[in-house]
Image (tube, rainbow, N blue to C red):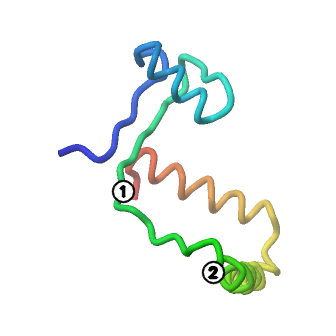
Amino acid sequence: MQTVSIQKAGDLPPNVKSAVEQLLGRLIGADEEVGVVAVPPRQIPPIENRAIVAPQLKNLLNRRAAKVRDICDEEIDTAIDEAVDRVRHGRE
């Protein structure tokens, strides 16, 4: 059973393309790729627990930011671009 599908937007049936555009809130070009992934449901805390989770998330993000504080934006962008390229093109 397939859990991932990637197709060119130009190859999508009109109703599917329209649904994707509605989800994204923008038009998509025929040369753009559209990917869909089916994943198990995530555990999302009830709304009353979000006040507890939000500071924890903020602390996590601050700790992550501190780790890269001395790295210039260009180096971070290059590392991200390389990682994305490896994932998209299966390069290791």
Task: Say which of 27 and 63 sits in front.
Answer: 27
- Position above or below: 13 against 41: above
* Three-letter code, disc 1: Val
On the image, the x and y values in percent for residue 64 come to: 70, 81
Report which residue position mark 2 lands on.
Answer: 49
Report which residue position mark 1 lands on.
Answer: 39
Task: Say which of 39 and 8 sits in front.
Answer: 39
Which residue occupies 67% across, 32% down?
25
Q: Quadrant of the C terminus?
A: bottom left
Q: Quadrant of residue 78?
A: bottom right
The crowding category of the residue bearing disc 1, from other C-alpha atoms within 10 Å (few below 14, some 14 to 19, many at least 20), is few
Q: Quadrant of residue 41?
A: bottom left
Task: Say which of 57 and 73 sits in front.
Answer: 57
- Position above or below: 9 against 42: above
Which residue occupies 63% across, 62% down?
79
Q: Quadrant of the N terminus?
A: top left
Which residue occupies 75% across, 80% down?
58
On the image, the x and y values in percent for residue 26 come to: 68, 28
